[in-house]
Image (cartoon, grey):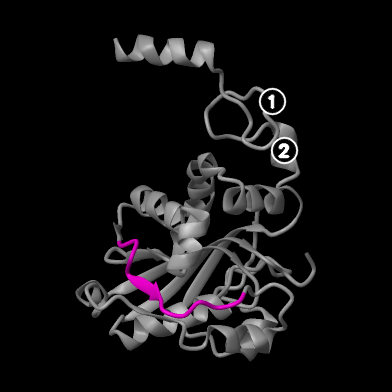
């Protein structure tokens, strides 16, 4: 009965490409044309932030930024480059109520982050300030982290961290200003400390530019007793992007 109902629904509402609306074979998928226009990250990547690197060595490598900056997290991965179709999808996910993009985005991110997962990790999103959450009505990072945790079979804590200070947007700020803007703005939820102590943490966000937001979140986790912190972002802003 359920199978027949699902078949009827698919007949009435056939799957469409999540980017352009063209017919596709399965739900929450891209058509071939949009897939080609979506810059997935493959090959050698920076082990700390996921940005693509030249070469094909299997050794651990790092980009110039991660060699220069003292990242408070251990490892990181990204699924996409923040440009072209990826940028359009993420902006729709973030600002246009396209919550239907979360299933596909979580699958892409799970594939990218699989090599750095550990069995006892707890997955948590980078938090929004409560005023921004009220205005936007949802935290896109939390939607992504919940589905990612489910795919990976890991614990998920959506309110592991709190954004305690309302910070101005990071847009149009240089790297130093981004880090100053986030300094002291994130802390561990006092009622969730038991989830953090001696645990590996995977922080999830939609986009990484300088890494300032993720750094503030990672420092909050470590200050609360986390063993190690890794990061997973749907898209990475790369210098050559």
Check contact, mark 2 vs mark 1: CB within 8 A.
yes
Q: Residues within 10 Å of mark 1 (few under 14, many from 20)?
A: some
User: Where is the C terminus found, in terms of image quarters?
Assistant: bottom right
Q: Of tags 2 and 1, which is closer to the observer?
A: 1
Residue 34 is labelled as: 2
In the image, residue 211 lies at what x, y percent? 58, 77
Q: CA distance from mark 2 to mark 1?
A: 10 Å
Q: Residues within 10 Å of mark 2 (few under 14, many from 20)?
A: some
Would residue 216 be seen by someone viewing this image from the given angle? yes
- The kind of secondary structure element at disc 1 is loop
Residue 11 in the image: above or below residue 63: above
What residue span does the magenta drawing correspond to?
Answer: 157-168
Residue 203 as seen in the image, left or right of residue 60: left
Would residue 39 be seen by someone viewing this image from the given angle? no
Residue 217 in the image: above or below residue 157: below
Q: Main secondary structure of the magenta part?
A: loop
Front in this rendered view, residue 53 or 187? 187
- The kind of secondary structure element at disc 2 is helix
* Residue at x 61% of width, y 46% of height: 96
Report the residue marked by disc 1.
Answer: 22
Q: Quadrant of residue 94?
A: bottom right
Front in this rendered view, residue 185 or 219? 185
* Residue at x 44% of width, y 78% of height: 217
In the image, residue 172 lies at what x, y percent? 74, 75
Residue 169 as seen in the image, left or right of residue 100: right
* Residue at x 34% of width, y 88% of height: 223
Q: Earlier in the sequence, mark 2 or mark 1?
A: 1
């Amino acid at each position: 009965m359920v199978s027949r109902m699902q078949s009827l629904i698919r007949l009435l509402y056939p799957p469409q490409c999540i980017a352009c609306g063209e017919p596709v074979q399965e739900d929450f998928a891209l058509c071939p044309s949009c897939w080609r226009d979506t810059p997935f990250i493959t090959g050698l990547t920076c082990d700390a932030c996921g940005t693509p690197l030249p070469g094909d060595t299997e050794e651990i490598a790092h980009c110039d930024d991660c060699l220069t900056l003292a990242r408070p997290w251990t490892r990181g991965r990204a699924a996409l480059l923040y440009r072209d179709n990826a940028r359009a999808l993420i902006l729709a996910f973030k600002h246009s109520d396209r919550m239907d993009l979360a299933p596909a985005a979580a699958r892409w991110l799970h594939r990218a982050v699989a090599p750095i997962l550990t069995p006892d990790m707890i997955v948590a999103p980078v938090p929004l300030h409560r005023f921004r959450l009220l205005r936007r009505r949802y935290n896109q990072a939390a939607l992504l982290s919940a589905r990612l945790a489910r795919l990976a079979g890991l614990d998920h804590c959506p309110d592991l961290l709190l954004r305690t200070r309302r910070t101005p947007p990071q847009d149009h700020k240089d790297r130093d200003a981004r880090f100053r803007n986030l300094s002291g703005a994130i802390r561990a939820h006092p009622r969730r400390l038991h989830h953090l102590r001696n645990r590996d943490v995977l922080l999830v966000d939609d986009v990484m530019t300088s890494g300032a937001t993720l750094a503030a979140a990672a420092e909050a986790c470590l200050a609360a007793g986390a063993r190690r912190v890794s990061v997973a972002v749907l898209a990475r802003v790369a210098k050559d992007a």
